[in-house]
Image: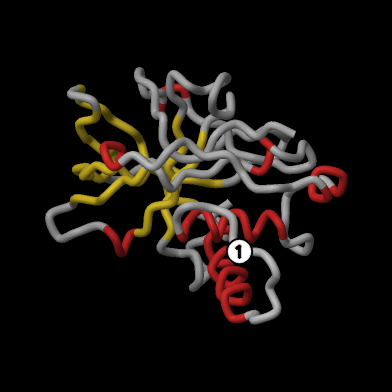
Amino acid sequence: MKKIVILLSVTFLWMSCNSNAKRPLMGKTVYQQELNASFKDASISPLKKKDLRQFKGLDFFEIDSTFIVTSKLVRTENAPTFEMATTTDRKPLYKEYGKLHFTLQGKNQELTIYQSQDDLDDEKYKDYLFLPFTDDTSGEASYGGGRYMDVMTTDITAENTVILNFNNTYNPYCAYNDKYSCPLTPRKNHLDLEIKAGIKVYKK
């Protein structure tokens, strides 16, 4: 799933430079525009062909700056490699990278962040960390299987803080097409509040 970020950037740049584009990019922020552009591109879109023909843009919650928080990272030392459960028999290798502690809506929160071991040897993706979560909107306003957020190791400060922007979340590809194999959000990464920010559930 991490590779979506690179694909988004390439697609967005191409569309921005294309003077023949007849329609403005869909979305209120650069992130939303990039995500919509990738879904509209048949060569990389996870949508089924019939859904792609009717695609008019993804649904997002309104941008809410209160869902941009500073978290404190406590790294997990000597974490073992484990096989993460997915929606199929695929078992990708991950390690627990650490725990993120932050305050949201006046409550102390904690999420576990992971590092893919399969991508460590890839120069393009070795700095990506994987943050899946569910919340009290999951299964209703947002996808029941949870949402994902990408965090870069290069975004972590010397004080071990990192900004989490819940407005910039995305759904696993399984939310759009059951041919994909997607990591399942661990139960411990449930937030006991409503994250009304970021991507909404996909409605055909």
Question: Residue 152: x, y in percent?
Answer: 37, 58
Mark yes or no: residue 82 visible: no
Front residue of 109 and 170: 170
Question: Residue 111: x, y in percent?
Answer: 33, 33
Quadrant assignment, res 171: top right
- Residue at 43% across / 48% down in the picture? 168
Question: Residue 67: x, y in percent?
Answer: 31, 38
The correct choice, above or below, for 101 with respect to 20 in the image is above
39 vs 151, left or right, is right
Question: Residue 53: x, y in percent?
Answer: 83, 50
Residue position marked by numbered label 1 in the rendering: 24
Front residue of 9 and 37: 37
Residue type at mark 1 is Pro
The C terminus, quarter of image: top right
- Circle 1: element type: loop
Quadrant assignment, res 183: top right
- Residue at 43% across / 23% down in the picture? 135
Circle 1 residues within 10 Å: few <14, some 14–19, many ≥20: few
Front residue of 120 and 161: 161
Given the current orientation, which residue lies at the most extreme left position?
159
The correct choice, above or below, for 171 with respect to 127 in the image is above
The correct choice, above or below, for 149 with respect to 153 in the image is above
- Residue at 55% across / 37% down in the picture? 84
48 vs 184, left or right, is right
Front residue of 102 and 79: 102
Quadrant assignment, res 195: top left
